[in-house]
Image: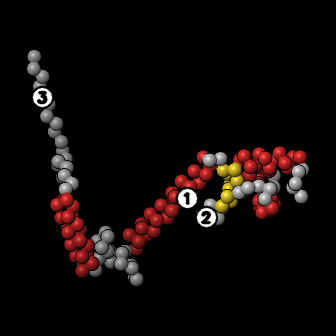
Amino acid sequence: MQRAIRQSVSTHPPRRRSTIRTKASERRRSALVRSTRIANGLCPTCGHGPPAFGYSICQKCRQYRLDRAAQKAFDRRVDYEMGLVFRGYRRSREIAEMLGLSHSQFKVYIRCGAIKSLKDPWRRIWVRLVDYVEFKKAWVRGVGLT
């Protein structure tokens, strides 16, 4: 008994191969589209409206670009923060609340060296949970915390 060979029927055209020649032609084509849009007084990015006053792109594209930049910055910040949390650090405000101190009182102990801390590029203070436990033990004993 022979099996019937089933041919796949696709509604999509076959994918173009990415070759150096097609990449070069894509660059030429996109440069031509961009220059045509600029010549017609349209936004070179989207081609829908005129560029915003004082800018080369329209307000919508500009806002999208700013939102993307802000999102990337936020993502970098979250990644950095998650790395610190994974390594056992917590924000100083959180630790101060755990101790029942105000943040300003807690910063005094950081400045005097009773608690080791770390500052991130966004000037936030981080404290390791291990240091918090040691500080808590010393706090209970009342050793060197005047």
Vertical placement of residue 103 versus 32, above or below = above
Contact between labelled residues 2 and 1, with CB atoms less than 8 Å apart = yes
Q: Nearer the viewer, residue 107 or 101?
A: 107
Residue at 52%, 58% in the rendered image: 76
- Give the residue at mark 3: 5
Residue at 74%, 49% in the rendered image: 131
Which badge, 3 or 1, comes first in the chain's sequence?
A: 3
Q: Is residue 45 left or right of residue 2?
A: right
Vertical placement of residue 86 versus 28, above or below = above
- Give the residue at mark 1: 77
Quadrant location of the N terminus? top left
- C-alpha distance separating marks 3 and 2: 62 Å
Image depth: mark 3 or mark 1 in front: 1
- C-alpha distance separating marks 1 and 2: 8 Å
Q: Secondary structure at mark 3?
A: loop
Rendering quarter of residue 47: bottom left
Label 1 is placed on what type of residue? Arg
Q: Position of residue 14 (x, y in %)?
A: 17, 48
User: Does any portion of residue 81 appear in the rendered image?
Assistant: yes
Q: Secondary structure at mark 1?
A: helix
Dot 3 crowding, Cα within 10 Å, few <14, some 14–19, many 20+: few
Q: Is residue 116 left or right of residue 81?
A: right
Residue at 62%, 47% in the rendered image: 87
